[in-house]
């Protein structure tokens, strides 16, 4: 489960209490303390060089990949790889959409609540404009700094265009609520 903006999880790593319904599940609660919207930030952030001289690196996404790989590789968990789900709300919903759609082969389903699908146009329909929040991590929409994947970060986070341009992508079952 991916938390919302400024959220954090402070749970015990292991608990014998089980889930609310005592389901036999493994729940993973990663933490995005830097509020990178579950993607990453500029590799020059905190350096004297301008952010635009570097690239936006998917550091947070790489941590999610490593967490999933570790859980799947751990024989103590005995995970059914056909029954992996991802959920998040708000910032976590945005991360769920981005990570879940681009890693569709991992997840049986994803559920995003109030997720962002295009930061560059956020607020255009009267909603919240999130660009000022992410600009210090990603640069401005006009700069559209390249990611370590190649495209500019705002192009990368235009999920509607990405899905339309990748009909071959293995997408999970998706539920979205706003």
Image: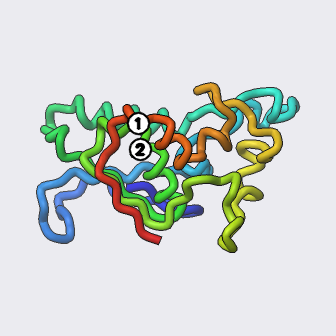
Of the two numbered discs 2 and 1 on the same chain, state the one appearing first in sequence: 2
Q: Is residue 100 left or right of residue 37?
A: left
Residue 159 visible (yes or no): yes
Q: Give the residue displayed 48% in from the left and 42% down from the top.
A: 164
- Please rate how many residues cluster around mark 1, counting C-alpha atoms within 10 Å: few if below 14, some from 14 to 19, many from 20: few
Residue 75 placement: quadrant: top left
The vertical placement of 14 against 102, above or below, is below
Label 1: element kind? loop
Q: Quick one: 54 or 32, which is closer to the camera?
A: 54
Residue 11 visible (yes or no): no
How many numbered circles does the render carry? 2
Numbered disc in front, either 2 or 1: 1
The image position of residue 158, as x and y in percent, is 59, 46
* Quarter occupied by the N terminus: bottom left
The image position of residue 91, as x and y in percent, is 54, 59
Label 2: element kind? helix
The image position of residue 21, as x and y in percent, is 15, 70
The vertical placement of 165 against 14, above or below, is above
Location of mark 1 (residue): 167
Location of mark 2 (residue): 101
Q: Give the residue displayed 77% in from the left and 47% down from the top.
A: 141
Q: Give the residue displayed 71% in from the left and 35% down from the top.
A: 42
What whole-number distance in Å separates the C-alpha atoms at marks 2 and 1? 12 Å
């Amino acid at each position: 489960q991916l938390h919302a903006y400024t959220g954090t999880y402070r749970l015990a790593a292991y608990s014998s209490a089980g889930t609310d319904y005592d389901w036999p599940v493994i729940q993973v609660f990663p933490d995005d303390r830097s509020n990178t919207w579950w993607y990453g930030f500029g590799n020059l952030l905190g350096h004297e060089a301008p952010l635009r001289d570097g690239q936006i690196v998917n550091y947070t996404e790489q941590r999610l990949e490593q967490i999933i790989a570790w859980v799947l590789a751990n024989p103590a968990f005995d995970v059914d790889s056909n029954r992996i789900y991802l959920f998040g709300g708000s910032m976590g919903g945005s991360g769920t959409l981005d990570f879940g759609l681009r890693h569709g082969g991992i997840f049986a389903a994803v559920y995003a609540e109030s997720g962002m699908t295009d930061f560059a146009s956020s607020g255009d329909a009267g909603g919240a404009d999130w660009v000022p929040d992410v600009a210090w991590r990603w640069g401005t929409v006009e700069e559209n700094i390249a990611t370590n994947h190649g495209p500019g970060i705002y192009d990368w986070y235009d999920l509607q265009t990405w899905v339309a341009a990748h009909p071959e992508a293995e997408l999970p079952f998706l539920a979205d609520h706003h």
